[in-house]
Amino acid sequence: MKRLILATLVVFAAMPALACETVRVGDIEVEHAWSRATIGADRPGVVYLSIRNTGSTDDALIGVATPIAGMPMLHETVVSDGIASMPHTMSMPVPAGQTAALAPGGFHGMLMGLTLALKKGDSFPLTLTFETAGDLTVTVDVLGMGAKEAECPDAQP
Amino acid sequence: MRLTRLQKILWAAAGVAALAYGALMVFSDRAPVSVAEAAFRPTFSLPDAEGRLRTPADFAGKHLLVFFGFTNCPDVCPTTLAEVAQVMDDLGEQAENVQPLFISVDPERDRRLGLAAFTAAFHPTILGLAGDTEQTRAAAESFKIFFERQDDAAAPDGYTMSHSPALYLIGPDGDWLRQFTYGTPATDILADLQPRL
């Protein structure tokens, strides 16, 4: 039954190009949410997106949640002295007037305990929690395993 | 003071060496290769997904693009393999002279999760290699790369791997040519690689 609910959620969410829309809460705008397809559900998935703080007060992304992963969390890839490691991070700063991103090689959402394999073309909801602005839910597009950026007409190169 | 014939030869040799060094610095584009690295031939002996032991000799005559990583890695490894896939696509017919290798630093788990399916998802030409602990350690030491298992209760199976994320270019005779630091775009790798082929 749980699987059916999840499948329904994914199908309902699978409307094209939703991830390319800008979603707002308070001074926070989020867009270009995307993920990579996974082989099976045993390996963690990833989430990337772009956050703009249009206000004059610093904010921070402090949590991520999604029905398709038992343990979604924020990580940051850190390359130090030629070694890459990926520490768990509690929050990502989103300074006033600036754009911050979950992007390859930096902060990223790591989806552990996937309840299903992510397939190219799927999409799923992701709820972001900001310290000040509160909660906001975006639709994440699942792209191919080799994807490097969001597939939106206005996506940053 | 008169210089002996030997002294003249030595001074001439020193002059030529200095000029050659200067020329090397001037003409070597973006990748100054140090003298120590010029004769560096890293090696490995690791089984592929079918259990066949592979060594650099199997790829003689080809350029190798070597990346050390692990398949449970959501960010760094897919990002680099995606760049490699792009390079292989953009090389067109020249791609047959290039062999990308993905060497697992987490071989036991990667074999269990499926190494070939992972590499093939990025590009069919990428060959995954996963040895035992000793073979993996030997390959890493030969390439002078670092990897380490880090216990992390929040990670899948309770651990994650930290590792050198660069991409290494090995020449057709096994010489280490250069590294591409993590995040080098496919277009830059391609621009470096094409004139060599």
Image (cartoon, rainbow, N blue to C red):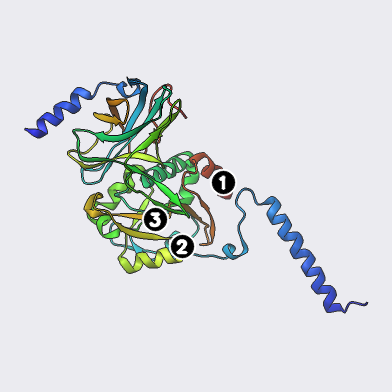
The x, y position of residue B136, in whole percent, is 35, 64
What residue do we see at 92% from left, 77% from top?
B2
Determine the image quadrant of residue B46.
bottom left
Q: Are marks 3 and 1 on the same chain?
A: yes
In the picture as drawn, the residue positioned furthest to the right comes out as B1
Q: Amino acid at mark 2?
A: Phe
Q: Quadrant of the N terminus of chain A?
A: top left
Residue A34 location (% of width, % of height): 33, 31
Per the model, the C-alpha gap separating discs 1 and 2 is 20 Å
- Label 2: which residue? B143
Find numbered disc 2 in the image and state the secondary structure of the residue it sits on.
helix
- Of mark 3 and mark 2, the one earlier in the sequence is 2
Q: From this viewpoint, is residue A122 visible?
A: no
Q: Is residue A48 left or right of residue A67?
A: right
Q: Residues within 10 Å of mark 2 (few under 14, many from 20)?
A: some
Looking at the rendered structure, which numbered label has been put on residue B192? 1
Q: Is residue B93 above or below residue A3?
A: below
Q: Residues within 10 Å of mark 1 (few under 14, many from 20)?
A: some
